[in-house]
Image (tube, rainbow, N blue to C red):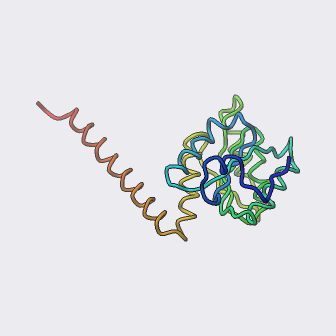
Amino acid sequence: MKPTRQRKPAREQKLGRSQPLVGVVMGSDTDLPVMSEAVKTLQEFGIPFEVEVTSAHRSPQRTHEYAHTAAERGLKVIIVGAGGASHLAGVVAAETILPVIAVPVVTTPLGGLDALYSTVQMPGGIPVGVMAVDKPGARNAAIYAAEILATADGALAERLRRHKEELARSVEEKSARVKQQFESP
């Protein structure tokens, strides 16, 4: 099944949001528990997105069509999660001029190292930004996508600034709690 250019993805239609800016792509529905962290983070920042399942190996034509039409459909960034051989991000990057952010997913006994290594070993000229393995990487991929989009969106830049302030505040609170445990009575 090829992605259509005329209609919004089903998730986009259901939520009634504006034009998606970020594509969240996964190699299999088994990647959803990890990639849902990227989706949740995009939602927290109010960034419209679409989701797609496509495989570099099992549905190469679908993958080609998705990546090849992403920019003309209005996407600005694509986040790709896959495990194992993990060629999906590289295939997508080869077919689009958009930034591609990869999330290596743990799917084998190697703990995601296979996915990480196959993703970072891209040939010169086909860049892929690679995040950490699994859920932390998915969250960071969404934040990185937000940072890319924020270069042209002042309101989003402000939301990111507040996010980083909250992270710093959280560390200060944790530090105070730890110090309190070791204070003399």
Q: In front: 181, or 88?
A: 88
When the figure is inspected, residue 31 is found, relative to residue 157, above or below; the finding is above
Q: In front: 131, or 4?
A: 4
When the figure is inspected, residue 116 is found, relative to residue 128, above or below; the finding is above
Instruction: Return the x and y of residue 165 as percentages of the image width and height.
Output: 36, 56
Q: In front: 116, or 55?
A: 55
* Relative horizontal placement of residue 179, taking residue 148 as reference (left or right): left
Image quarter hosting the C terminus: top left
Instruction: Return the x and y of residue 10 as percentages of the image width and height.
Output: 71, 47
Q: Quadrant of residue 82?
A: top right
What is the number of callouts on the image? 0
Residue at x-position 68% and y-position 37%: 31
* Relative horizontal placement of residue 4, taking residue 100 as reference (left or right): right
Instruction: Return the x and y of residue 21 as percentages of the image width and height.
Output: 63, 60
Residue at x-position 87% and y-position 48%: 60
Instruction: Return the x and y of residue 96 as percentages of the image width and height.
Output: 77, 62
- Residue that extends furthest to the right in the rendered view of this protein: 61
* Relative horizontal placement of residue 58, taking residue 145 as reference (left or right): right
When the figure is inspected, residue 36 is found, relative to residue 90, above or below; the finding is above
Residue at x-position 22% and y-position 32%: 181
